[in-house]
Image (spheres, rainbow, N blue to C red):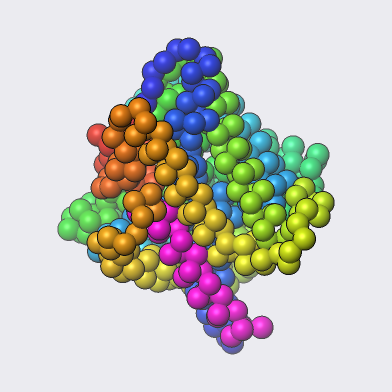
Amino acid sequence: MSQSTNPLKIVANGLLAENPTFVQCIGLCPTLAVTTSVANGVGMGIAATFVLIASNAVISMLRKMVPDEVRIPIFIVVIAGFVTVIQFLMEGFAPELNKSLGIFIPLIVVNCIILARAEAFASKNGVIASALDGVGMGLGFTVALTFLGAIREVLGSGTLLGTQVVGFDPILLVVLAPGGFIVLGCCMGAFRAIQAKLAARKGACSPAKKASGCAGCAMSASCPSAEGGKA
Amino acid sequence: MTELFLLFLSSIFVHNILLSRFLGCCPFMGVSSKSETARGMGVAVVFVIVLASLMTWLTYNFLLVPLHLEYLYTLSFILVIAALVQFVELALKKLNPTLYKSLGIFLPLITTNCAVLGVAVLNMNEGYGLAESLVNALGSSLGFLLAISLMAGIRERIESNEGIPECLRGLPMALITAGLMSIAFMGFNGIIK
């Protein structure tokens, strides 16, 4: 993980180089489930970003007090606390969105992005850097969700943010469950192809190669048996 | 009885936890490249989900509801699940070291598997009683085992396929495969009204 202290770099890192959805491939469940429309994608992204920033900051403050053996349960309690806060906020201020995101709001607790960042970044870095990392990762997640949400909404229901945009009959399949998998798979492939092209121009080796073995595992960031892989 | 059976079937096939509810996708993608490990993960998940549903049901109905603390369900469920997983890990290490060797590395990851918390929250939202919760938990987790085993079988086959473009190899192809499987599972929609 990058240990850079330049605030801009930390934010950009989450947005591009370590984009949680397209590069690290973590936090897939909400990504697949809520991206049926742009509004849902943005809502989920903002909720997760709030939890990420707050929990990263608090965990970073606690990092010297927490014994190593029980750090994961403690991290989870901190995260669950903030998720309960966001559940209350959403119920009060955005009941519609809360309803359409449904079960995936409480499930932010077990979103691997948040625990992975707590483990890989916040427990090793200062408060401000950790909060910025939360901003970057949260933005990366939000952008990815919005992007997928836009594709699925345009193709699947022919609308964008609720207004009609295309003339053809919408492809219903795209907003149903299978569409989520297929659209994400295609986007990830495209992202990799672009990355490989950019890397080839720079003369570096293709990044698609790292997706093998333990390092390619979706959970290597938080997986104890893959310490050498990514962390 | 018929209702429980229908619930069981629908939680395996119609509302398959991976392919239609999108819960537990991380291990579904991460651990499905070999059928042996996939099966191990699936069995561990069945075990943990059923136990966790029992424990969270008890916690909710005998602790949170009497104390009017229902809003703390997220926090208490995840704590119960984390403690349970730790306990299962210890018990397995003691009782069955061979199984521990093959399942051990998955157990810490199951804590952050949204399928476990997801099934617990679903049971609560639907207002299921104890029997319904357990049936739903068993069905959902068997659905997980089924989907991840199928997926691993397919991935083992397509891994050596040279025809797939380089940028789609690995995860992207796995996602597209999952999409096709999901279409196939939609076919079960008709069996239960």
Which of the two residues, A226 or A70, is positioned nearer the viewer here? A226
Judge whether residue B178 is colored magenta: yes
Instruction: Using the image as rendered, state which of residue A99 and residue A76 is in the foreground.
Output: A99
User: Residue at the spot x=74%, y=37% of the render?
Assistant: A89
Q: Residue at x 34, y 38 (%)?
A: A207
> Could you tell me if residue A171 is visible in this image?
yes
Above or below, B151 relative to A21: below
Residue B125: percent from left, percent from top: 66, 60
Residue A122 vertical position relative to residue B116 in the rendered view, above or below: above
Q: Position of residue A79 (x, y in %)?
A: 55, 35
Using residue B114 as the reference point, say whether residue B147 is left or right of it. Answer: left
Q: Position of residue B52 (x, y in %)?
A: 47, 57
Residue A38: % across, % down: 70, 47
Q: Is residue B72 covered in magenta?
A: no
Q: Which residues are magenta?
A: B169-193
Give the quarter of the image for residue A205: top left
Predominant secondary structure in magenta? helix
Task: Identify the residue at image location x=40%, y=71%.
Answer: B146
Res B41 quadrant in image = bottom left
**In-image side of A122 versus B11 (left or right):** left
